[in-house]
Every structure is written in C-alpha cells, then in structure tokens.
Amino acid sequence: MATGSLGVWVPVLPVVSALMILAFLRDTRRLAARVSVSILTLTLALALTLLVHYLVTGGVAIIDSQGVFGSLWLDPLSLVLWTFVSGISLIVHIYSVRYMAEEPGYARFFALLDLMTGVILVMVSAANLLTLLVAWFLVGVVLYFLLGHDHRRPAAGRYAFWTQITYRFGDLPLWFAALILVHCYHSVSLPVIFARIQRAPHMQLWGMPVPELAGFLLALAAFARSAQFPLHVWLPYTMDGPTPVSALMHAGIVNAGGFLFNRFAPLFEHAGWALHWAFGMGLMTALIGSGLMLLQNDIKRSLGYSTMGQMGFMVMECGLGAFPLAVFHLIAHGFFKASLFLGAGDVIGDARAHDGVPPDPIYTSVVERRPARPSRLPWLVAASLTVLVPVVVLSLSHFFVAEHLFYEQGVVVLLFFGWVTGAQALFAAHKMSQQDPWRLMLGILASFVVVVIGYTLISHYFGRLLYPDEHESLMLYRAASIHRLSFDALVMLLAAVFVGGWALTFFAESFEVGRRLGGRGRGIYLGVYALLSRELYVADIYERLGQVVVQWSRRLNVWLRWC
C-alpha cells in the first residue's frame, strides 16, 4: 500500500474510534475501553511503520484532498510527532482503563481521548493553513470538555473555562498571521507559501517585512498555547481535571508552541526579531516557572509550574535557532512529565504513609551507629569540579560532533545553560551529606558525562533527521544571532544573574536569611517571598479584570433594556 494511502488512516482511526464509542458503545464500559485501546495500538503501529519507511526510503509525501481543507504533509516533523503523540496517548489510554473505572461518563471519557488524539495528529501534519487553523481551534475545544469531564467539581469547570479563554486569545494572532500569509503569497498551501517566502523574503506589508510581522504573530500564538508568562495562568490550575488529561496535555497540547515554530521554520529564517522576542519570553518564563515550582505544596500544581518552566526553555531554544533541539526537548519532556503525572497518586500515597520527618540525630548516632554529621568534599575540590568539569565535558562533546557550531551564538548560549545546569547539579551534590562523598560525586560525574554525550549525539542526529539540509539549520542560527557587543553583554549578564542566584541560595540556606536579616532586609525578604507565594499576583489581576468586565456587562445590559 502506498505511503499516502496508509498515512491517511493515522489521524482517521482515533476519530473513528470516538464516533463508534459515542454511537454504539456508550453503555458498554469495558468494550468501549477495549476498542479505544486497540485502535490506538493500531494507530501507533501505523505511525511507526511510516516513520521506519521514511528512514529507509527518505521520501516525503503530501496527501492532497483536492481542496482547501484536509491536506496532510508527511514530512519528518509530522512522522516523528505522529509516533510521539500516539505513543503517549496509548499510555494514557491504558492507564485510564482502571483509573477512571469508578468515574461517571467512562465511555465518553475514552471517546474524548480518542477525539483529542485524532485532532492533534491532524494538527501536526496539516499541509495547508485552513487545516492547521481548524485543528488548532478544535484542540482547545476538546481540551475544554476533557478538563471539565467531572461535572461535580465546580473548580474543574471554572479552570477549564480559563483555559478556553486563553486559547481563544492565542488563536487570534494565528488567524491574523494566516490572513497575512494568504494575502501576500496567494496560497493556503504551506509548502507553496514557504517556497515563495524563499523567493521573496523581503516582501513588505504596511511598511513592515511580512516574515517579521507574521513571525511575531505566530510567536504570540505559541506563547498562549505553551503557557508563557503572563499567559501561563491556565496551566497550573488545570490540575483540577482528571490526572490522565494532565498527562495527555504533554502530547502536542501545552508543547504545541515548539511544533508551531518548527512548522514555520522557513518563515523564521527571515524573522530574526521574532526569534529574539521568543528568547526573551522563554528565558523569563523558564526562570519564573522554575521558581514558582519550588513554592508549591500540591504535587500536581508543582508539576504544572515545572512544565511552565520547561516550556520556557523550549521556546528559548527556538529563540536561539535550535529548532531541532526544541522538538527533542518537546518529546523527551513529554514522556518524562506524563510519567510523573501518572505516578503522582503513588507519591501522594507514600507521603501519607511516611511523613518524611527526619529521625532524631541521637537515635541515628547511637542506635543505627551512623555519624550524625557525615563528611563532605573539601570546598576547593568541590568548587573546582563544579566549575571545570561541566564546561570541559560539554565543549568536548560538541567539538567532536559538530565543530563548526562553536561559531554560532545560539550554540554558545546553549552551552552556557548546559554548564549552568551541570554546575548546579554538582553544587547540589556537594551539599548532600553522605558517608562517602567521593563515591557520590564520582557517580554524579559519570552520569553527567553519559547524559551529555548521549544528549549531544541524539540531538545532532535528530537535527539531521528533521532538517536534512544543513543550510536550513545554519540559516536559523544566523537569524537568531545578534550584534557581537550585545551578545557579549548578554552572556555576562546571564553569568552575573546565575552566579548571584547561587550565592543567594547558599547564603539563604547557610545563614537562615528569614531569621538573621533584620529591619529593611527582613522586610524585603518577606516581600519577595509573599510575591512568589501569591504567584506574582497574576491570577488575582486576571480575576479582578474579569470582575470589572462582568460589572460593565451588567450595566450595558441594563442600558440596553432601557432602550
């Protein structure tokens, strides 16, 4: 069977499963679950078959519906994301068989899961703008019904509505970008639009370059869908929905921003300022999300803010021109975070069984015959390992894989963040009290080397898979570059921020800032803590704005009745 004929069934099968369940299997719970899981298994098998076929033959196919809607583009990005989405969806389906067994609307839940999977599969493989826009819109609609599946929980319905509003706000710039591209390049076909952009990259509309204008709008749509600050409020509050939905959200929903950047990569080659904006927003979101994650006492909300931080890193990678790395990050984080959500119940059960209160030091020393204060590595040795080892490992790994990339600013910044992450891990290992600190540090070093080498090799060859033309990747790095002096200043600023953060963390943990600081210093400390604990008051501001809109709506209603 031809690739196109086989490929059309990948997004169609989950939709067929949803229609079968809603039409014939609503009252047969077990049969509905079995049909759903079986069809998703077949979908994953078809997606894997098409991916392997591409790896062997290297052929890219476009399934043309002979119209303006329904065309599919079977390129490497689509095939990889088909396998990823169907894989996570199958895991969520299997998990939901028992997890949702006592919930009302059991068959309806599986139908919605199938429908969501089918819509996402259409979205990531859309070959024209209309198909992409419709699928992008339907993802938000189906997600609304999934998040509000339990009608007995008012909070779930309220936060599902928050998500719906944010998604509709993010749809507007995407529609405007589509209208601009159709108006300027006279086609709805994405391959045709990209080819015409390459022939006329400096076309202008309203005195602005069309790629830059469309790039800004596409980036704003990606920000809303991927929970970038300050459009992030919907994500941590969707945790009131079913746990399987929280896991499924990492299969092309919350990380759809990374897909959108990669799908329009030929446009972003000529939209450097849009990439700079994405880098700034991603960096700010990563810092805020990671910070708010540490202050949560609810495990699912903590995972939600962790996802926000990771989506910030993903958008930041796109802003640096590392588009293949963003897709790799999207996939790796999707599987990792989905497994964490599905295992959140076990963590909660363990926390209830074991309170985590540390044992008395006298009991530990006398009864268990362990030292009350285990030794640590010498400070100078730990500092040397923390500073030198990550930069040496990262530099050598990238040097042997792709030496020419050292001249790209985006790669330099990524190496810098890799060094920060590795140094932070070694610094945290140094603070851990162990009987054998040398064995602990050597284990951390060995695992770090393995992870970096594997990550470098996988990301390099993965980039070759998504972008076989190396010139295209270099063009993206060129578009993300900035002036040399500005780049040097940026690196020094980031270095100062992270070094200052390390120093503040060490000072806070070693000297108990909240107690030792007095007067104005203590007030500043408590103010910052209150600001973070209230999640920067963003949710409060949105709630207040909603109340103002409702009040003015009531006044308008009264005024209209008087007329």
Image: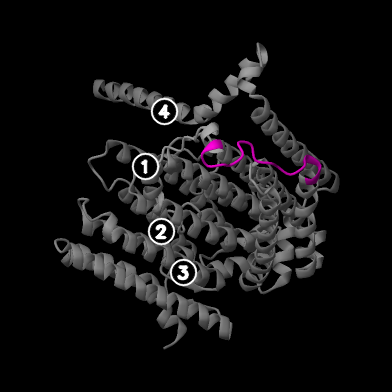
Query: Which stretch appears magenta?
Result: 366-381
Q: Which residue position holds label 2?
A: 134
Q: Where, quadrant-wise, is the C terminus in this rendering?
A: top left
Q: Label 2 neighbourhood size at 10 Å, few (<14), some (14-19), many (20+)?
A: some
What's the residue at 15%, 64% (across, down)?
28
471 w.r.t. 150: above or below: below
Nearer the observer, disc 4 or disc 3?
Answer: 3
Q: Is 423 colored magenta in this rendering?
A: no
Asked which colour scheme the image uses, the reply is one colour
Indicate the position of residue 306 as horizontal and vertical percent values: 52, 45
Q: Residue at x 51, y 35 (%)?
A: 363
Report the residue at 73% width, 59% height from top: 477
Sequence order check, earlier mark of 2 and 3 = 3
Q: Which residue carries the number 4 mark?
A: 543
Q: Which residue is mark 3?
A: 82
Q: Tell me the tag on residue 353.
A: 1
